[in-house]
Amino acid sequence: MTVQRALSFSLENPCSLPTRTESLRIRCSLSSIVCGIAMPKVKADAKAADNRLKRKGAGAGRKQSKKAAKDPNKPKRPPSAFFVFMSEFREQYKKEHPTNKSVAVVGKAGGDKWKSLSDAEKAPFVARAEKKKEEYDKSILAYNRKLEGKNPSEEEESDKSKSEVNDEDEDEEEDEDDE
């Protein structure tokens, strides 16, 4: 940047200020003129390297976080009432608007429709969502037992009280005695 360009900054637009880099170059060029020192020219390669460093975060070397691998056997979370509604609404919308290919339009229309529904109209979707949540709770319990190493059949036996187990054993012994 020349001295004329530096001075024209203030003349052209008094409100615009040079950037930090430009102001540093202005100072250097002014000091080199005053002191009679020849400043080395900046190479285009150096500018490109500076730009690359800026884009990469100045070589900070970001660490990639290691996420735990997802278990494919883990049950999926149940949908909320809105998502139960949207599954039906998508089918209806596709029948009414077969030429529409935009997912955003369908989502926007579904959201507007959901907001306009009363609580009574939302009730069947809420009920289905609750039912799916109960099924999910059962399946996640079974999944967690499986992870712990317990079999579901062992868990059922432990639900019986000890007296019931003893009663069954006594019944079997009586049946053997009768024969």
Image: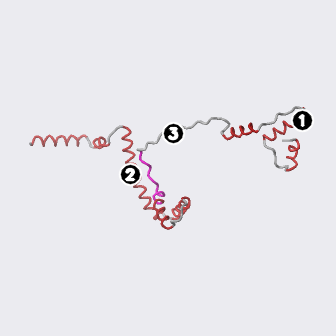
Circle 1: residue type = Ile
Which class describes the residues within 10 Å of circle 2: few (<14), some (14-19), or many (20+)?
A: few
Question: As displayed, is residue 55 above or below residue 85?
Answer: above
Q: Which residue is mark 2?
A: 135
Question: As displayed, is residue 95 above or below residue 51?
Answer: below
Q: Comparing marks 1 and 3, which lies closer to the viewer?
A: 1
Mark linked to residue 136: none
Callout 3 touching callout 2 (CB < 8 Å): no
Q: Is residue 163 left or right of residue 18?
A: left
Q: Secondary structure at mark 3?
A: loop
Q: Work out which quarter of the rendered image holds the C terminus and state it.
A: top left
Distance between the Cα atoms at labels 2 and 1? 81 Å
Q: Is residue 83 left or right of residue 160?
A: right
**Range of magenta residues:** 74-85
Circle 3: residue type = Lys
Q: Secondary structure at mark 1?
A: helix
Distance between the Cα atoms at labels 1 and 3? 57 Å
Q: Which residue is mark 3?
A: 67
Q: Which residue is depicted at the point 81% across and 48% down?
A: 16
Q: Which residue is mark 1?
A: 33
